[in-house]
Image: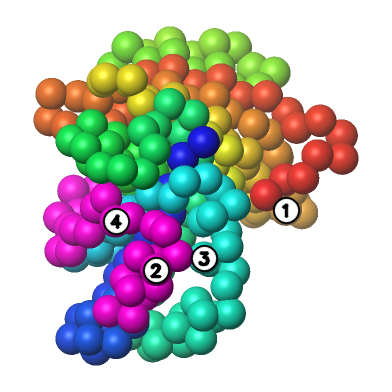
Amino acid sequence: MAAYLVVIAHVDDREAFMGGYARVAAALVTRMGGRYLLRAPGALGLEGDGLDGASVVVSQWTDMAALRAFWESEEYARIRPLREGIARCKVLALESPDAPAVGGDAAGHNRAAAIAGIVEAGERWKSSYASGDLVAMRDLYEPDCLVNPNAAPLLKGVDAVIDHFARHARSGNRVEVESTIESIEVEGAFGYQVLRFVMSIAPSDRDAYQIAGRTLLVYKRGDDGNWRVWRDMDNSLAPGEAVI
């Protein structure tokens, strides 16, 4: 099963980053069997804080074992410090059962771009929720979306969804969400993502608490090329199951 390493990098010193870390890391990726599908600097941040100017890098590996062998290698451990102080990175690893094997074709590039878009949409959702930016959250859902929170009624349409999530903002609660992607599949204009999440909620009038679960998300690519949630179903994790 093909695996992907997705990096969203906020580079403060591009000359030092490209001349040092990026050059050496690229050579190691190639030597250890990976292949770059997307290296796009200077992204235009349309929604969410801190995304403007970010670089998105996607490399493809034969499987998760090969990806982890690279990421956990002694060679990469020596390279990683080269980016310290000049870049802030979010790094995700994921598998896609229907992805083409490393070898290279237009479909592979399109799939990698779709996966990167879905991952970025998820990151924007988390930052928008944490900051209480309901306008940004609204643009991350299709108008006719259906969302079924765990042990709660089905939410029909984007208005109902945003009203549901706004309850924390109305109550003055602070909310942060962490997640681990388990799989992403892409078929045409639809993307299917499974992830584990933990939501940390800090009310103003009582002790903080957490909610953990697993989510099945169906994304739909709009005419503008952006990926938005079309269907969403949550469930609690089994007792003893790892959260993140």
Q: Earlier in the sequence, mark 2 or mark 1?
A: 2
Give the mark toward the camera: 3 or 1.
3
Task: Tell me if 2 is positioned left or right of 194 in this view.
Answer: left
Does residue 99 sit above or below 104 in this rendering?
above
Q: Earlier in the sequence, mark 2 or mark 3?
A: 2
Residue where numbered disc 2 is placed: 31
- Cα gap from disc 4 to disc 2, whole angstroms: 12 Å
Quarter of the figure with residue 226: top left
Task: Tell me if 240 is positioned left or right of 97 in this view.
Answer: right
> What amino acid is at disc 3?
Phe
The residue that appears at 18% across and 86% down in the rendered structure is 15
Q: Earlier in the sequence, mark 3 or mark 4?
A: 4
Q: Residues within 10 Å of mark 4 (few under 14, many from 20)?
A: some
> What amino acid is at disc 2?
Arg
Residue where numbered disc 1 is placed: 208
Colour scheme of this structure image?
rainbow
Q: x and y percent of residue 51 in the render?
A: 27, 59
Give the residues drawn in magenta, as a range: 23-47
> What amino acid is at disc 1?
Ala
